[in-house]
Image (cartoon, rainbow, N blue to C red):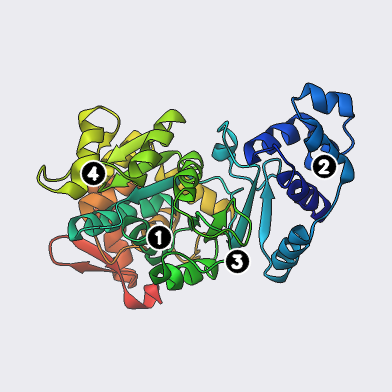
Amino acid sequence: MDRKELIDTLILYEAPHLSHRDVARVVLQAGSATAVFSTPRAVLRNWGLKDATIRHIESHAVSDDIKTQIEFIEKHSIATISYNDEGYPSLLRMCEDAPLMLYGRGDIDFTIDRPVISIVGTRNITPYGASAVEEIVAALSVYRPMIVSGLAAGVDVHAHRAALKHNLPTVGVLGQGLGTPLFPSSNRDTAREMCSTPSCGIVTEYNHLMAPLPGLFPARNRIVAGMSIATIVIEAKAKGGALITARLASGYNREVFALPGRMSDPCSAGCNALIRDNKAIIIDSPQTIIDELSLSMEREVKMREENNQTIMFPELDSQEQKVVEVLRPHEKLHIDELSVMLGLAPFELAGVLLSMELKGYIETQMGKYYALTPSMRA
């Protein structure tokens, strides 16, 4: 979004009798925020705008608040992503309540063709939930998805940290402005790491001074659900934000997955209800998510090659390079897991692994597990 379009959008946000959703409707009708200001008064009236709103538009006044916000954006290199920009999340654009503009910090690129998956859940995560997050993200890592969540305590921050651990792009959607102290404060180090890691960062629809008020978080959840092909619910109480996100995802015709739990555990009550009511697919293993979403390792490897993201080793053939790509995010993998991920029969894979072991690229561990050698990881 260029500077003029940004300023014109902010002027419209200050117009009386216009919600942000109304502003989005008007801008889409006009074609851009700047075009609204050259739209005849009669047309604006036909769009349902009140006289006070029209007078505000005709004044085209840049308030001190707008000047302050522009100064903050430029000083801190905040990205402003308009609904009409190529860099706007493509799936979010399909939602009728999508925000007109997102503010972003970090190295976020929504133009890359990759699956976007949200992981949400309770703030009171249990060891069971934490283990499930790690296992699921590790299994998904070979397909190189972007992991999205709300950077809240509990499941959200565990999902972001697991994504960072496995070198996956991850984006946190905030319910506050970028110029206010992050809530909760315990996640600030994770937010800083995300903003300094390639392909990661944080976004929000709120101006820089908007405090993290309770009512903003449910609205934030529509962005989490809207930009994702699927939402995974890891532990949720009978009522809470994770269930709102799941309901929104379902309303957008996106897949919803839920991790089952003990019937006596209140942190699993929401997930169990989603499964019982046929509102979510049960996660009996990470492979269920992979199968239901038809994730393809070959497609993702090809995409990374096209974007120069694959680490190439000229001395390895194509199959051996794929083995390196699959093993790199993991400490070790069983031969059966490798067989599924690579699409090779075990007897075919055994020959490839033996060749790589003889070359010193991988090592065999007890129980038919394989890992990259320390020199390859370095």
- State the SS at label 1: helix
Q: Badges 2 and 1: C-beta atoms under 8 Å apart?
A: no
Q: Answer above or below: position of 194 versus 266.
A: below
- State the residue at coordinates (26%, 62%): 354
Displayed quadrant of residue 166: bottom left
> What's the residue type where badge 1 is placed?
His
Q: Nearer the viewer, mark 4 or mark 2?
A: 2
CA gap between label 3 and label 4 equals: 35 Å
Q: Which residue is the extreme one toward the top?
A: 46
- The mark that comes first in sequence, 4 or 1, is 1
Q: Which residue is mark 4?
A: 259
Kindly identify which residue carries mark 2. Answer: 56
Could you tell me which secondary element the residue under label 2 belongs to? Answer: helix
Say few, some or many: other residues with alpha carbon within 10 Å of mark 3 (under 14 / 14 to 19 / 20 or more): some
Horizontally, is 144 left or right of 287 in the view? right
Q: Residue furthest left?
A: 264
Q: What's under tag 4, amino acid-wise?
A: Leu
Tag 2 or tag 4, which sits nearer the N-term? 2
Rounded to the nearest whole Å, what is the CA distance between mark 2 and mark 1? Answer: 42 Å
Question: Who is closer to the viewer here, 334 or 20?
Answer: 20
Can you identify the residue that label 3 sits on? 179
